Image: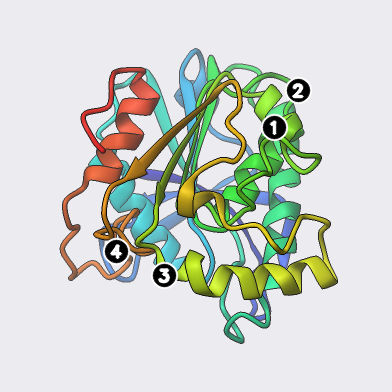
């Protein structure tokens, strides 16, 4: 059974809950079987354990997020010292590229709310780590920026944030508040190569103050290099934007599972066997 923090309102339109709902259930069946547990994680489940928050990216519905994150938890197969919590946020793709600025803003807002949740509700937890895909990278970096204690591991895959964000005003504070940030990137990611600059330009116009001339962190890694940041670049062009997390379609196979192994190794603090 997977635990989830759900920041999504029930109606269409991408509303955000100020206080997330805690859900638990089976995300490996369709439709998912979930039950409401309240607004705090069960104390007995988190006491003395490391809580790993993992979140999806852009253009993901609640159901798709539940499926992909439940599959990710199964694939990571973390030992009992860890507690996996999937984070659901309203990153739906209503109008391709054009609504990216609103979703980037939603990711940032949910990141601040997740930090508030951790700061007020996770005093019993031993450590906190975070994992993300795509635009979920903004959510987790925003979370770490506002945490009252350092995150142990922050693992960002195909991160849809600027490549210089970890040393600039946007997320240097997040880097300083993380014991390590692990970046997995691929130049085979056509979404980050082609669509990200267009969407990020609109985001700069309407929302944030990063640099529209920069490429994505998940495309070629961090520039410049910085302390506490591990950069792993996937060779060749085999891995596209959708090859990092398990598919949300339960009927689709899960590829090589190498990115999941990378995440598991990062969390366990063991040497990476790939890339």
Q: Whole-percent x and y of residue 119?
A: 73, 28
Residue nearer the viewer, 123 or 217: 217
Mark toward the start of the polypeptide (3 vs 4): 3
Mark 3 vs mark 4: give the one in front: 3
Q: Horizontally, is 2 left or right of 258 in the view?
A: right
Mark earlier in primary sequence (2, 3): 2
In this rendering, which labeled residue sits more in front, label 2 or label 3?
3
User: Which residue position is annotated with label 1?
Assistant: 174
Tell us which disc is closer to us: 1 or 4. 1
- What residue is disc 4 on? 247
Residue 36 can be seen, yes or no = no
Label 3 Cα crowd, 10 Å radius (few <14 / some 14-19 / many 20+): some
Q: Circle 2 is placed at which residue position? A: 148
What is the C-alpha distance between the residues marked 1 and 2?
Answer: 11 Å
User: Is mark 1 in CB contact (under 8 Å) with mark 3?
Assistant: no
Q: Which residue is pictured at 39% across the width and 57% down the height?
A: 187
């Amino acid at each position: 059974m997977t635990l989830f923090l759900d920041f999504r309102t029930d109606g269409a339109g991408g509303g955000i809950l100020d206080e997330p709902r805690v859900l638990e259930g089976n995300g490996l069946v369709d439709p998912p079987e979930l039950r409401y547990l309240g607004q705090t994680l069960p104390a007995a489940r988190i006491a003395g354990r490391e809580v790993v928050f993992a979140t999806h990216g852009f253009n993901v519905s609640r159901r798709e997020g539940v499926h992909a994150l439940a599959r990710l938890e199964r694939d990571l197969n973390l030992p009992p010292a860890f507690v996996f919590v999937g984070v659901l946020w309203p990153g739906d793709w209503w109008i391709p590229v054009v609504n990216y600025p609103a979703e980037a803003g939603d990711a940032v807002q949910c990141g601040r709310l997740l930090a508030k949740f951790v700061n007020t509700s996770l005093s019993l937890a031993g450590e906190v780590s975070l994992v993300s895909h795509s635009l979920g990278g903004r959510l987790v970096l925003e979370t770490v920026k506002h945490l009252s204690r350092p995150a142990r591991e922050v693992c960002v895959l195909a991160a849809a944030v600027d490549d210089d964000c970890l040393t600039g005003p946007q997320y240097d504070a997040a880097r300083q508040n993380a014991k390590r940030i692990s970046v997995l990137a691929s130049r085979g990611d056509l979404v980050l190569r082609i669509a990200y600059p267009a969407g990020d330009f609109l985001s700069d116009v309407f929302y944030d103050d990063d640099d529209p001339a920069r490429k994505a962190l998940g495309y070629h890694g961090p520039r410049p290099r910085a302390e506490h940041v591990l950069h792993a670049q996937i060779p060749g062009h085999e891995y596209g934007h959708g090859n990092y997390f398990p598919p949300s379609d339960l009927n689709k196979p899960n590829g090589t599972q190498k990115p999941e192994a990378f995440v598991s190794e990062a969390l366990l603090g063991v040497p990476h066997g790939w890339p």
